[in-house]
């Protein structure tokens, strides 16, 4: 695990790199099915279905581990900032978003396969990519802005 850089300006570099790695990790999970003619989990042989569910669960687990490490990194950065009212508000909301998404993500993963596994895998990919993009543009962008402000002060 990488530690928080002494030079806070470098923090944004790791955050961006993490977001790209996260997208790469989840990308393609929605295309897990190799049945091109008519993908249908209900008609899939049990052994193949079991291999698919194991593969999706494996990616799902690795994404969760990655997210936890990434959130912990951003939250360590938050603690390095001077706790002005603006920073305090940001940290509270930003951490809340991490918790909310972790809960939503875990719920989604735990329901995988309860309906169509393929639809679930596609939904998982969309969920992570869309959330990462939205969250990065709002909260992570604001965090790196605050870091820049105080690192350069
Ligand atoms: Fe974040
Ligand atoms: Fe992030």
Image (cartoon, grey):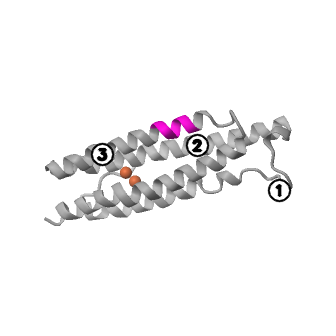
The 10 Å Cα crowd at callout 2, few under 14, some 14 to 19, many 20 or more, is: many
* Range drawn in magenta: 103-108
Q: Dot 1: what SS? A: loop
Q: Which residue is mark 1?
A: 36
- For residue 17, side relative to residue 119 (left or right): left
Can I make out residue 7 in this image? no
Q: Write down the quadrant of residue 109 in the picture.
A: top right
- For residue 18, side relative to residue 40 (left or right): left
Residue name at image x 26 percent, y 63 percent: 145
Question: How far apart, in angstroms, are the residues tagged by discs 3 and 2?
Answer: 25 Å
Q: Nearer the viewer, mark 3 or mark 1?
A: 3
Where's residue 45, x and y in %? 86, 38
Q: Which residue is mark 3?
A: 93
Residue name at image x 83 percent, y 52 percent: 35
Question: How far apart, in angstroms, are the residues tagged by discs 2 and 1?
Answer: 23 Å
Q: Earlier in the sequence, mark 3 or mark 2?
A: 2
Magenta stretch: dominant secondary structure = helix
């Amino acid at each position: 695990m990488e530690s928080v850089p002494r030079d806070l300006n470098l923090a944004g570099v790791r955050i961006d790199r993490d977001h790209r790695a996260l997208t790469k990790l989840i990308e393609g999970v929605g295309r897990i099915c190799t049945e091109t003619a008519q993908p249908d989990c209900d008609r899939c042989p049990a052994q193949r279905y079991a291999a698919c569910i194991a593969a999706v669960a494996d990616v799902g687990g690795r994404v969760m581990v990655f997210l936890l490490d990434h959130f912990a990194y951003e939250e360590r950065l938050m603690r390095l900032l001077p706790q002005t009212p603006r920073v305090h508000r940001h940290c509270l909301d930003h951490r809340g978003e991490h918790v909310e998404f972790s809960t939503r993500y875990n719920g989604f993963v735990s329901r995988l396969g309860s309906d169509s596994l393929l639809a679930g895998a596609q939904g998982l990919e969309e969920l992570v990519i869309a959330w990462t993009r939205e969250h990065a543009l709002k909260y992570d962008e604001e965090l790196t802005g605050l870091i820049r402000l105080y690192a350069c002060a």
